[in-house]
């Protein structure tokens, strides 16, 4: 099955409650083109199904959807519509550091800390950003580092970027990822750890 059309809806109080768990507000969601969806269509040959339920979000470029995020669907949490380096369109190159995060949610969460960094996120930790993109980014920032999940996949990705591109990386110990850490331990506790972790690689 492939995604064949989506319907964007208005934000509601339940969406707000969900995203604010991670200290992610309306302004940052708007900046990164995250939109709530009423439904989306999936097609396969002559079959077409419509998925309609609460808590479905679309990640968009300026004009097209590239990923669907369903946080309440454990089996199909993410549906990739097309390849896209998340956050690349929002880079302003006005900060000295770039942090490659494990997900767009983590990237948006990190931006809310107000550090002098910009953020991007590949499709997944298993997706290695192409060499020519990394080379271009390293020329635009004082330093590029990774902040990936505290699990085997995240640790392996950190080592991979270090081996391939001489990019140092780190992870949080409080939770599996940054957004979950904020949800589970609060902004202040995460700030205390993450500022030390980032300082160690920057």
Image (cartoon, rainbow, N blue to C red):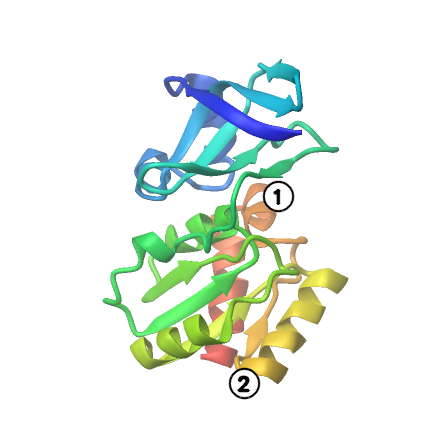
Q: Nearer the viewer, residue 109 or 34?
A: 34
Compared with residue 133, is residue 109 higher up or lower down, i.e. above or below?
Answer: above
Q: x, y (%) of residue 162?
A: 59, 81
Q: Locate residue 13: give its quadrant.
A: top left
x 44%, y 75%: residue: 132
How crowded pointer 1 is (Cα within 10 Å; few <14, some 14-19, many 20+) is rated as some
Q: x, y (%) of residue 6?
A: 47, 22
User: Could you tell me how many numbered marks the image carries?
Assistant: 2
- The quarter in which the N terminus is drawn is top right
Q: x, y (%) of residue 46?
A: 66, 17
x 50%, y 46%: residue: 105
Q: Which residue is mark 1?
A: 184
Q: x, y (%) of residue 36?
A: 44, 25
How crowded pointer 2 is (Cα within 10 Å; few <14, some 14-19, many 20+) is rated as few
Compared with residue 71, is residue 191 higher up or lower down, i.e. above or below?
Answer: below
Circle 1 SS class: helix
Disc number at residue 166? Answer: 2
Q: Nearer the viewer, residue 154 or 23?
A: 154
Q: Locate residue 47: give its quadrant.
A: top right
């Amino acid at each position: 099955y492939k995604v064949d059309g989506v319907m964007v809806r208005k934000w509601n109080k339940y969406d707000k409650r969900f995203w604010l768990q991670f200290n992610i507000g309306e302004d940052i969601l708007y900046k990164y083109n995250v939109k709530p969806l009423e439904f989306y269509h999936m097609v396969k040959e002559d079959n077409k199904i419509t998925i309609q339920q609460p808590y479905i979000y679309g990640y968009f470029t300026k004009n097209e959807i590239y990923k669907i995020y369903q946080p309440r669907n454990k089996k199909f949490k993410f549906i990739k519509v097309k390849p896209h380096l998340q956050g690349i369109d929002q880079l302003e190159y006005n900060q000295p550091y770039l942090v490659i995060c494990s997900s767009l949610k983590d990237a948006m969460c990190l931006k809310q800390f107000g550090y002098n960094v910009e953020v991007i996120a590949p499709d997944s930790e298993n997706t290695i950003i192409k060499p020519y993109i990394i080379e271009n980014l390293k020329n635009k920032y004082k330093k590029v580092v990774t902040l990936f999940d505290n699990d085997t996949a995240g640790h392996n990705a950190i080592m991979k970027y270090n081996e391939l591109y001489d990019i140092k990386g780190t992870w949080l110990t409080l939770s599996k990822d940054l957004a979950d850490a904020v949800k589970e331990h609060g902004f202040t506790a995460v700030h205390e750890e993450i500022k030390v972790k980032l300082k160690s690689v920057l």
